[in-house]
Image (tube, grey):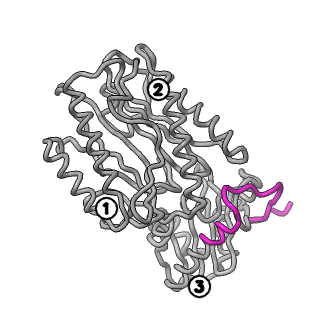
Amino acid sequence: MERPQHYRFHQGEKVLPFADAEYEARLAGLRKSMADMGVDACVLTSMHNIAYYSGFLYCSFGRPYAQVVTATETVTMSAGIDAAQPWRRGYGDNITYTDWQRNNYWRAIQSVTGSGKVIGYEGDHLSIVQMGLLDEFLSPKQKVDIAPATMLQRMHKSLAELELIRAGANTADVGGYAIRDAIKVGAREVDIAMAGRDAMELEIAKRFPDSEIRDSWVWFQSGINTDGAHNPVTCRTLERGDILSLNTFPMISAYYTALERTLFVETVDEASLKVWEANVGAHEYGMSLLKPGATCSEITHKINAFFEERDLLQYRTFGYGHSFGVLSHYYGREAGLELREDIDTVLEPGMVISMEPMLTIPEGQPGAGGYREHDILIITEDGNENITGFPYGPEHNVIG
């Protein structure tokens, strides 16, 4: 039988997170950047950019995926193992490449880009090996790193994106309440985490019945396990007086939102209460600084000063917030919009950013543990809109 290098397999109806007009607007923004840079065709390879410009979130399992965008075409490239799902879940055309001959992936891409063109690529994603194959199969006249321009575009949210992000923040709150209800002495971290995850997935299924249910998760930490923000769930059982860190992360069509809160089991000692209240104070102060015209570095220095006045700055563990959108713990990052000393981005209306100060007091010291509060805020014309509803602080989160 004849074994094709690639083919089109389209069946079923398209189901996308956003209306066609949303994707056309995003592609128009990308094409403007391409025109400004003299790029003939973009070969996007990251999960976040392909999801942003097409709606399709791939599952790699060791196989490469792409979206090729030219002045007139947008085509996703997917492996045969996915059949027609990438076409149903992606805006525009789709080509399936076969594994009957090595590098059919690049042959499929070349069928759209042609040879000898100016190719845009993602410098922060494309591997050295794949870059060599790009050179071999596309014979580009020139290569241009398009990743910074795409990140800048993703940092500015559309009204449709803001609506989805608000729903995500609401869903994170649902998970938070389920977790709070499950907290008790003797309960395991893993069981409490599952309660939050299950509640969020049910909420997503209710709000978005046509979406793919995937990738939502919870990090619920207790005691010494709270010292790092990304520490995984364990089977540790809760004890009276434990510090807790509640972290819910609903994923809706590749869009990430989060809720993070400090809690205590039944009682909180005086030393811990002092640190907790200071971190809550930094959280509230930081949220008041999130306004259009402020720079990320300026905000960071002001919160640093707040902690330094209280002799706590040495316990800060990372920056104070970051952008939201198409990202997760394993793909995507809008690094140009983070509250750090080395980021001078100016906040603008339509950006979405968290405020999440964290202090980690080492084990053996009074108040030992990790303290973190986290709200998501949309920058508005004259300030911000806080879309997180779960309460924070000692008045609400000493449980039991």
**Side of 328 where 221 appears, left or right:** left
Q: Which is nearer the eye, 58 or 158?
A: 158
- The reply to whether callout 1 and callout 2 are in contact (CB within 8 Å) is no
- Residue 117 occupies which quadrant of the picture? bottom right
**Side of 230 where 2 appears, left or right:** right
Mark pair 3, 1: CA separation? 41 Å
x then y, percent, for residue 107: 67, 70
Q: Which amino acid does label 3 sit on?
A: Gly
List the residue tagged with mark 3.
Answer: 116
List the residue tagged with mark 1.
Answer: 296
Sequence-wise first label, 3 or 1: 3
List the residue tagged with mark 2.
Answer: 180
**Side of 262 where 37 appears, left or right:** right
Q: Which amino acid does label 2 sit on?
A: Arg
- How many other residues sit within 10 Å of disc 1, few (<14), some (14-19) or many (≥20)? many
163 is higher (above) or lower (below) than 273: below
The answer to whether residue 95 shows anywhere in this view is yes
Q: Which residue lies furthest to the right in this view?
A: 1
Mark pair 2, 3: CA separation? 59 Å
